[in-house]
Amino acid sequence: MYSILLERGELPLEKYITTRFSGGKLDFSLIDDTHGFSLIDNENQNEFIDSFRKFEELGWNVIATDKGLDYKTYNKNKKSKRYFSDDLWKKGIKKFKITQRNRCFGYVENGVFLCVEV
């Protein structure tokens, strides 16, 4: 049902994603407007949804080795250190691939990937 509302333009993408994937392995509550859903355009929104669906459906062991998701630790360096607060870096920033150009960044807590940026 939510998919139909999204296709018709009656449901914003942010609402669709947060509703569709709530209570699973993904949590989008920490994403803000400057690094979040507003950056996803109509052209690639399906790729985001497909990647989130895949992430939800796979087990953690498969996620860690899946070539398509390319899930791994995001390392702090001179350039990247300004992207996240020290508190977030201490939690261990991870990333997975959405498109050739886009990634989803976050950290894992209690078996849930808390997304902080897409």
Image (spheres, helix red, strand yellow):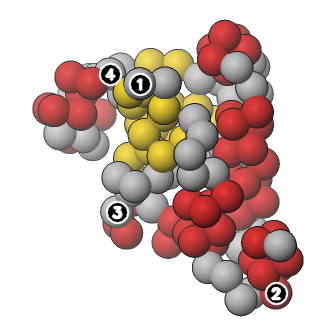
Q: Which SS class for mark 1? A: loop
Q: Nearer the viewer, mark 2 or mark 1?
A: 1
Q: Earlier in the sequence, mark 1 or mark 3?
A: 3
Q: Earlier in the sequence, mark 4 or mark 3?
A: 3
Measured in 3D between alpha carbons, the distance from the residue under mark 1 to the one under mark 3, in whole angstroms, is 22 Å
At label 3, the amino acid type is Asp
Quadrant position of the N terminus in the picture: bottom right
Measured in 3D between alpha carbons, the distance from the residue under mark 1 to the one under mark 4, in whole angstroms, is 13 Å
At label 1, the amino acid type is Asn
Residue tagged by mark 3?
A: 32
Is disc 1 in contact with disc 4, using a CB cutoff of under 8 Å?
A: no
Q: Nearer the viewer, mark 1 or mark 3?
A: 1
Residue at 44% x, 19% y: name it: 73
Q: Which SS class for mark 4? A: loop
Residue at 16% x, 32% y: name it: 87
Q: Earlier in the sequence, mark 2 or mark 4?
A: 2
* Circle 3 crowding by C-alpha within 10 Å: few under 14, some 14–19, many from 20: few
Residue tagged by mark 1?
A: 110
Q: Is residue 92 left or right of residue 82?
A: right
Q: Earlier in the sequence, mark 1 or mark 4?
A: 4
Measured in 3D between alpha carbons, the distance from the residue under mark 2 to the one under mark 3, in whole angstroms, is 25 Å
Where does the image place residue 97, in percent across and percent down from the top left? Answer: 63, 36
Is disc 2 in contact with disc 3, using a CB cutoff of under 8 Å?
A: no
Where does the image place residue 109, in percent across and percent down from the top left? Answer: 38, 27
At label 2, the amino acid type is Arg
Q: Which SS class for mark 2? A: helix
Where does the image place residue 3, in percent across and percent down from the top left? Answer: 81, 70
Q: Is residue 110 left or right of residue 78?
A: right
At label 4, the amino acid type is Gly
Is disc 4 in contact with disc 3, using a CB cutoff of under 8 Å?
A: no
